[in-house]
Amino acid sequence: MDVTPATSRRVSAKAQLALDEVRMAALAAFTARSMKTERPVPFGSSIYHTKTGEMLLQTLNAVAKENDPSSHAEVKAIRLATKKRKSPSLAGYTLYTTCEPCPMCMSTVLWAGLDRVVYGATIEDASNHCNQIHIHAVEVAERSDMACKVVGPVLRAQCYALFTHPNMLRAFSTWTTRKTKFKTKSQK
Ligand SMILES: [Zn+2]
């Protein structure tokens, strides 16, 4: 074989990105279906087996539906997945999310032992519409003893379009976490 290991790794990374984009596009489409419902949400998450590529499940943010401020899409997906697998560990799995995980969600990702997390829109993007905690997912991961690869943004524009959908913009005005003031200083 005349393929060097370095080249193999590059091709493999490219193939991984292509896979991540396909799965993120599917998740964005799944999340977009909520725009036609009574409770539109821009936040969706899916969990795939890292090696086989089999999808375990996909779900949406259910904070309003469940009156539970911790029912972010990522936490909800992890709760459903661990129950389904009858194990508190999701080692060997990858979580996709339409928006960068907040510190609560990233902490849950780490406690669950997920291999990778792939996000679409950023915390700054979400912050244009609803309150956020400004600590990046990668920073939470780096400060932990657990190993989890944080990848993103992937298909950022497609995921951010969920936030700016007319039905979503209307719905944000009723959110308890709606953005009530705009920051004037620029954010990183
Ligand atoms: Zn969250």
Image (cartoon, rainbow, N blue to C red):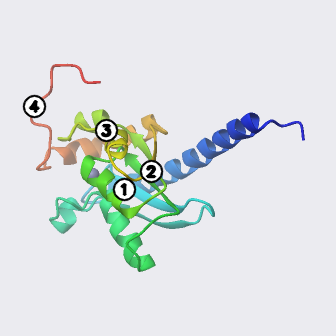
Which quadrant holds the N terminus? top right
Question: Which one is in front, 114 or 24?
Answer: 114
Q: In this rendering, which labeled residue sits more in front, label 2 or label 4?
A: 2
**Disc 2 secondary structure class:** loop
Residue matched to label 1: 110
Task: State the separation of the CA atoms marked 1 and 4.
Answer: 32 Å
Q: Relative to residue 96, is residue 156 depicted above or below?
A: above
* Residues at marks 1 and 2 touching, judged by CB atoms closer than 8 Å: yes
Residue matched to label 2: 148
Provide residue 164's location: percent of width, then percent of height. 31, 38
Local packing at callout 4 (Cα closer than 10 Å; few below 14, some 14-19, many 20+) is few
- CB of residue at label 2: within 8 Å of ligand 1? no
- Mark number displayed over residue 136: 3
Q: Which residue is drawn at 39% across and 72% down?
A: 82
Amino acid carrying label 1: it is: Leu
Q: Which of marks 2 and 3 is nearer the N terminus?
A: 3
Q: Which of marks 1 and 2 is nearer the N terminus?
A: 1
Amino acid carrying label 3: it is: His
Q: In this rendering, which labeled residue sits more in front, label 4 or label 3?
A: 3
Provide residue 43's location: percent of width, then percent of height. 33, 51
